[in-house]
Image: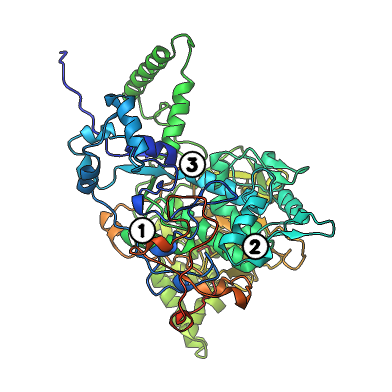
Amino acid sequence: MKQNFTLRAAILWTISDFPAYGILSGWATSGKKACPYRMEKSKAFWLEHGCKVSWFDCHRQFLSTDHPFRNSRTAFCKNKVEKGAPPHIMSGEELWECVKDLPKATDGPESLQRLKKEKKGWFKQSILWELPYWKHLRICHNLDVMHIEKNFFDQLIHTIMDVKKHTCDTTSARNDIARYCKRPQLHLQEDDRGKEVMPRAPFALDKAQRKILCEWVKELRFLDGYASNLSRCVDMQACKLHGMKSHYCHVFMERLLPTALRELLPSHIWNAITEIRQFFRDLCCYTTSVGDMERLEKNIAEILCKLEKYRWMYPFERFLNHLKRKIGNKARVEGSICNAYITEEIANFCSNYFEATVDTTTRDLGRNVNADVDSIVDDSEIPELFTEDSGRVSNEGKTWFLDEKELECAHLFVLRNTGILGEYERKFKDYILSSRPYLRREEVMEKCKAEFSDWFHRKVVEEDTNSDVLRALCMRSFKRVRTWKQIFVGGFNFHTHAHGKHKSTMNYGVCVSSEDGGEGMNIHELYKLVEVNHTKKYPKYDPFVLSYQVTQVYYASYPSLKRDRVQWWAVFKTQARSVVDAPVDLEFLQAPSPQVHATLCPPNDIPDYVVDDDDDIGFIVSSDEDDEFSINSSDSDEDDDIDVLLDDSSDDSSSDSSDDINE
């Protein structure tokens, strides 16, 4: 029976980049008042030589009141200390009081032009305020981390690699640095011919370093389905990276950046870049808690500046691309998309009534994923390792015969991982300790494990047990086995080293959890970065693992002009594309996270630039009450001098502060 009904939709929030944020909210996102938090109290200033608005040194106000960066007069704007407090975040009701009398876009261009001339920051009243619930929402607008991360990475890598027309380190920037900062090493200098030259900045790579970084990126290999081939984005002639899409920037920013720059940049610059990378990675994780968000909000003030809340645009971008592919008639674009979308919806609805064995679009599990198959064996006594999904292989494989050492090790590995022989292991320890009392109970299985299989076989025969499982376990396996060069398990695609060493992907990195760290592995104390010495080998003979207990890793060397770290590889642990590490228990999100997070380096590890004592004649006090002491805080952008508050007691009242993976 057909019935008509009223379909109602609600707008929960908007997701956009920063320019579109201004269109949706009605607040101008350009000029000195572009910050939607500071609004009219913005401390942004106009760069005389750069001819643009700058928010340099506007982030110290978000630091804790006792942070040493607040009193530093050399690391930021010269002779300026920060005493201001973070801005008040206005509620929806407070914002409504600000915009309720503003003209709307439907009121005509004349009213909007008058509002723009008043320079209040608002240029219209958004149509979203007509929604009765809009002013009661906790979050109305979200910034898209996809665009922000790409823009941030592009500016960062182009500046580090000193790419012409893309770097932020220009002659205009150096002239502005000379005016606003105490960094004489970065000032423009004259050569013998009287021509101004730019001394190389400590954060910029020279030509040899840029070349070796490009060669490193060109030789990178990732897992199957993890990332595209980055070698296509390398220009060896110009020694630069180009044409990097959002996902390329995402992978490079959150995974590769610390490894790529660790041996090329000074340690204090590498620390700052690594902390920014860690912030983006923590922000983009699948699961988070209230404590994690509070930690990120505190850290980002020290790393860079206060950022707003984010949400992903990746699903929407991919869905729009999916709709574009449905265009069959370019003369009727909208109708073509609608017809194709309705047909797809009908097909997906009907596919739900097919048999479970029928492969449909809605049941497509994705790359490297195995379908769940119910076990035909229903016996609670059978160990888990025989009932778990062991993966699927690509072909029939080859026959292989195990030698005595491999056969003994395989049998012992199965016995130790069944999980049902706890009673027999205790009896075996008592048996060994009765004849060797000098051993400790904890050392029995480690030093006498080679005797366990034979003892277990004799014990089962003596007891004459009725358990078919125990009788089967005490017998050794056949020497004849079958081997494969490729297997799909747990959402991963594994290759043997011989099979995958010449491929463009790296699928032979296997990770198994263990309590033994070993001397061939290092974990960075602050940032928890893992590296292994690939020349070291595991001393014990233990070649077998359970397929459903392994995860995948990939390795990358360090690009460096030196040869002292050739033996060390950075290790990157990955997660299967089909797996979302989301907790089922909702209380988990409110509980303290047991994970050990990366921490920030101490503020004193960031050195200040060397300055002349003669220039230190006073300092500026910046606060919410005294905004006139901020740089170029007046409406005029033509002032040539910086306002300096002289105080003879400044030297006494202020101080100069320098700026698990288990393999």
Disc 3 packing (10 Å; few <14; some 14–19; many ≥20): some
Left-right relation of 115 to 560: left
Q: Is residue 22 above or below residue 417?
A: above
- Decide which of tag 3 and tag 1 comes sooner along the chain: 3
Name the residue nearer the viewer: 286 or 130: 130
Location of the N terminus by quadrant is top left
Mark 1 secondary-structure assignment: helix
In space, the residues marked 3 and 1 are separated at their CA atoms by 21 Å
The x and y percentages for residue 354 are 34, 23
* Labels 3, 1: front one: 3
Question: As drawn, which residue projects farthest toward the right?
Answer: 192
| Amino acid at circle 3 | His
In space, the residues marked 3 and 2 are separated at their CA atoms by 26 Å
Mark 3 secondary-structure assignment: helix
Which residue lies under the disc numbered 1? 293
- Decide which of tag 3 and tag 2 comes sooner along the chain: 3
Which residue lies under the disc numbered 3? 147
Left-right relation of 169 to 328: right
The x and y percentages for residue 545 are 55, 58
| Disc number for residue 262 | 2
Mark 2 secondary-structure assignment: loop
* Labels 3, 2: front one: 3
| Amino acid at circle 1 | Met
Disc 2 packing (10 Å; few <14; some 14–19; many ≥20): some
Instruction: Give the quadrant of residue 88.
Output: bottom left
Q: Are marks 3 and 2 in contact (CB under 8 Å)?
A: no
Name the residue nearer the viewer: 529 or 434: 529
Q: Is residue 477 above or below residue 149?
A: below
- Decide which of tag 2 and tag 1 comes sooner along the chain: 2
| Amino acid at circle 2 | Arg
